[in-house]
Image (cartoon, rainbow, N blue to C red):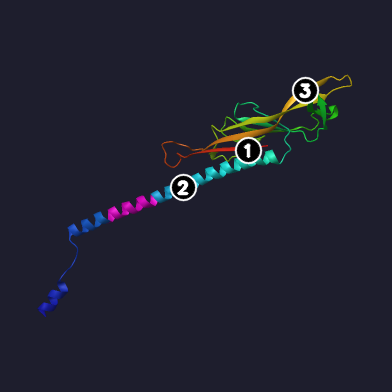
Amino acid sequence: MKQFVKIVTQKNGFTLIELLTALVISSFILVIASTVLISGIQLYKKIGIEVQLRDEADYAVTRIMQELYSNSIDDIKLNCGNVDQCLKLIDDTSVNVSAEIKNDREVSIINKDGINSSSKEIIIEFKNDNNLYIDTEQINSSKISFGGSKITAKCNNKTSIVKSTDGSGTATIQTRCDNAIITIELTVKHSQYDASNPLYDQVLYLTSKFGF
């Protein structure tokens, strides 16, 4: 009976040192797990921002190319306001144009009744508010900045245009750029860009060249 009472009343448990040791180890494990989880979330967000930057850059270039190739561009102005930030594309598809030899050179003759009758101008511009516009339409989203981006053109071929006026033979000669290489230099950042913040310190640089 005494032995039974001894067995029943015997208490087995953790000492204070064992509890403190377990608490310290659990704290270390919790800190490591939290760090890994937070780093994973930050990496996921960072990758998402990088993908967004690339998508916006691709969309911007695609829209510019779409405007260029979906219209019959007859002339291009190398700048139309801010130097290296603006191009003007001109479509004169409705103008009556014929060829004529003048001074041993072939030039284009624009019928006086068709001059500027329905000329279409398309303005592509990186404005000072860090956004890209095609005419009045903002192309990029509000979360993306194109600050520092440039658009330029190098004319490869110029055509002399003679605008006939009246029967007296008086005419105005105009030079047009009908073949050029357009260069787009994109600097793409998040609108919350901060060089000291690992999440928003990404800058995407993209250069694209194409001709018309």
Q: Position of residue 146 (x, y in %)?
A: 55, 35
Q: Which label sits in the foreground, 3 or 2?
A: 3
Residue at image point 83% right, 28% down: 100
Which of the image's four quarters has the N terminus? bottom left
Q: Which residue is mark 2?
A: 45
Q: Position of residue 186 (x, y in %)?
A: 55, 36
- Going from N to C along the chain, the mark reached first, 3 or 2, is 2
Q: Which residue is mark 3?
A: 173
Q: Residues within 10 Å of mark 3 (few under 14, many from 20)?
A: few
Residue at image point 58% right, 43% down: 58
- Quadrant position of residue 129: top right
Magenta stretch: dominant secondary structure: helix
Residue 44, can we see it?
yes
Q: Which label sits in the foreground, 2 or 1?
A: 1
In this rendered view, identify the residue nearer to me: 188 or 24. Answer: 188
Q: Magenta segment range?
A: 26-38
Q: Residues within 10 Å of mark 2 (few under 14, many from 20)?
A: some
Image check: 167 left or right of 146? right
Task: Give amino acid for label 2.
Answer: Lys
Task: Give amino acid for label 3.
Answer: Ile
Residue at image point 46% right, 47% down: 45
Q: Is residue 124 magenta?
A: no
Task: Give amino acid for label 1.
Answer: Phe
Report the label total.
3
| Secondary structure state at the residue bearing disc 3 | strand
Q: Is residue 28 magenta?
A: yes
- In the picture as drawn, the residue positioned furthest to the left comes out as 2
Residue 123, can we see it?
no
Q: Which residue is mark 1?
A: 210
In this rendered view, identify the residue nearer to me: 120 or 179. Answer: 179
